[in-house]
Image: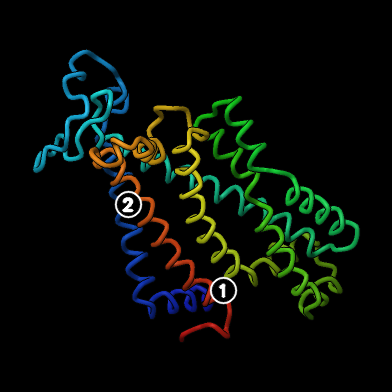
Amino acid sequence: MHHSLWKTMWKEIRHDWIAVAGLIVFVLIIAATYIGSLFIDEVAMTMMSDDLATFRFHPPIWGSPFAPMGFDSMGRNVFHYFIIGSRTSFNIAFMVTGLSVSFGMLVGLVAGYFGGLVDWVVMRVLDFFSMVPTIMIFVVIVIAMQPGPVGFSIMLAAFQWVGTARLIRAMTLRQGVMEYVHASKTLGSPNFIIIFREVMPNLVSIITANLTLALANNVGIETGLTMLGIGLPHGYPSLGFLINFGTFPYNMLNRLWLWLPAAIMVIIMMLCINFVGQALNRAADAKKRRV
């Protein structure tokens, strides 16, 4: 990416105080989550014993570093589950976003650059994915296979790349008629070099904006599916697992410590990423830039 493009994106973020605040909060949450998880014994956290039964549904012990968020239905420390669950949800969101955006970008670049029969075949595939009930298929596969975080991320990414592919294809078609592309072809540069060294750098701002917005969306998707019982296996630490406690009326009204912090975390993360993504989206369009 050109240095000037990085500078433009940073300038757009810097002149939007909401985006700056969102970026700072996002970094602090990520750092606290991943550093905090290093001090938690995951094996001991999920082990069951008769001693833990005495803490069943015990409310938060305010001011206590041991249990500031109380205990769940099995007597497990909710704070530990919150930290490890946040890390799991963030890992899945990052993995799904990376896989889906990378694959969608590759497909879009190839279709837009070569055009013709290649573009026709790719578009028919995209149309197929757009028509089939992907959510229903995804739910059936998840229920049948009960995948862990990695398998869940791969399966979710397999249904998330279509929008990126369409966007990048459209932008690549515009770049394909530019003089620099024709000049490179005339000089005999390999297609691979033209696509990834010349065309793609001109789309980085679009790709970056799309990536951040996709990340916010994927944070919500994982937690939503797990909350409904069609995501990660039951009991696996994640924000969705904690929010699931709120689906029970008594817990929703009387045991807020079980689900409310996780719900607030998801909302804050989605807002922070969206604020940054909107600034990057403006940076990608010269007509919308504030500076």
In whole angstroms, how far apart are the C-alphas of marks 2 and 1? Answer: 37 Å
Question: The N terminus appears in which quarter of the rendering?
Answer: bottom right
Which disc is residue 264 wearing? 2
Which disc is residue 140 wearing? none
**Residue 164 picture location, percent across and down:** 65, 58
Pointer 1 residue: 2
Count residues near mark 2 (Cα–Cα under 10 Å), then give few for <14, some for 14-19, many for 20+.
Answer: few
- Is 48 drawn above or below residue 277 in the view shown? above
Give me the residue at 80% from left, 64% from top: 113
Looking at the rendering, which quadrant does residue 193 occupy? bottom right
Give me the residue at 74% from left, 74% from top: 175
Describe the element under mark 2 as helix, strand or loop.
helix
**Residue 253 picture location, percent across and down:** 26, 42
Looking at the rendering, which quadrant does residue 259 occupy? top left
Q: Is residue 5 left or right of residue 58?
A: right
Number of the front mark, 2 or 1: 2
